[in-house]
Image (cartoon, rainbow, N blue to C red):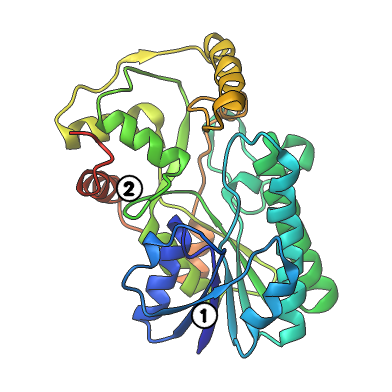
Amino acid sequence: MICLVTGATGFVGSAVARKLIAAGHEVRVLVRAGSDRRNLAGLDAAPVVGSLDEPATLAPALKGCEALFHVAADYRLWVPEPAKMYRTNVDGTVALMEAALAAGVGRIVHTSSVATLGLLPGGADSDEATPVTIEQMVGPYKRSKFLSEEAVQRLARERGLPAVIVNPSTPVGPRDVKPTPTGRTIVEAASGRMPAFVDTGLNFAHVDDVAEGHLLAFDKGKIGERYILGGENLTLSAFLAIIARLTGRKAPTISLPIDLLMPLAYGAELYARVTGKEPFVTRDGLTLARKKMFFTIAKAQRELGYAPRPAEEGIRDAIDWFRQHNYLGV
């Protein structure tokens, strides 16, 4: 089967491409001119130059493809120009899906995010059906992913787009080259530069299990349905404690009030506008941290056969990879 993977230079996309190649499929990867291609090194995948921001490049990339795995997204919790993120995540997704329809692609997996899902009070586990509105989406990343997922569902209903939606939680593991916001947290904690934390929680999954979930969704998922590809719910304190144990460091014990950090986030964002470097702490990130993002993967387990490993294995693999590639400075 000939597959096009978008976002294969990134964290989750490269894992998906690897799984497809290992399964014996012919893989093409959509790459921007001049993009960082370290995650493609050694992969038997054909690069096709194109971009979600350039719709004319999408039809040639899809020509002859039987499958599309749309993993690419602008994933940042702070952006100086939100309009660019909407163009990539929303307009780019719609253009890609339109091109896939025109090309007659037989089946599509669209990578959304748990960021689009509703949250329950008290840290209870949310699922794919937990109610949510766009007004509850904090920041341009969450809003853009919500709108792009909504567009894919609409095209599936109205135009017969053969798309299954997956909602990864917080992936951890090897090849986080950028790194992602979670990867940056692992690097800082593993390097001994995180003395405190906020009282929040996330659902963590090994990136390779998330990738395997994409293939399961392709094979077994229902058109128009969405599936949470998560793993283990952990408080941030527990997450940092695992990192401390794996690196032989002392776990942080100071819990900081979110309101106390808001002025710091504001200053960090102002500094980022001057330097162009993404701030480590942001107002949107702190607002999101007010609720624990805990989820159940029961639907993916039941309908797809999804079976992720314990989160600690992904954290260990992430630390090992960061150490081997000199991210930790130790």
Residue 306 is at least partly visible in this image: no
Q: Extreme left residue here?
A: 248
When asked about the image quadrant of residue 78, the answer is top right
Numbered badge on residue 66: none
Q: Secondary structure at mark 2?
A: helix
Q: Position of residue 318 (x, y in %)?
A: 29, 47
Is 18 placed above or below 25 here? above
Numbered badge on residue 219: 1
When asked about the image quadrant of residue 248, the answer is top left
With 29 as the anchor, is 322 left or right in this view? Answer: left
Contact between marks 1 and 2 (CB within 8 A): the answer is no
Is 176 placed above or below 292 here? below
Residue bearing the label numbered 2: 311
Q: How many marks?
A: 2
First of labels 1, 2 by sequence position: 1
Quadrant containing the C terminus is top left
- Spatial CA span between label 1 and label 2: 25 Å
Front residue of this view, candidates 209 and 261: 261
Residue depicted at 45% across the width and 44% down the height: 180
Residue depicted at 46% across the width and 38% down the height: 181
- Circle 1 crowding by C-alpha within 10 Å: few under 14, some 14–19, many from 20: few
Mark 2 belongs to which amino acid? Ala
Residue 11 is at least partly visible in this image: yes
Mark 1 belongs to which amino acid? Asp
With 323 as the anchor, is 84 left or right in this view? Answer: right
Q: Position of residue 176 (x, y in %)?
A: 38, 50
Q: Position of residue 202 (x, y in %)?
A: 46, 38
Residue depicted at 61% across the width and 45% down the height: 115
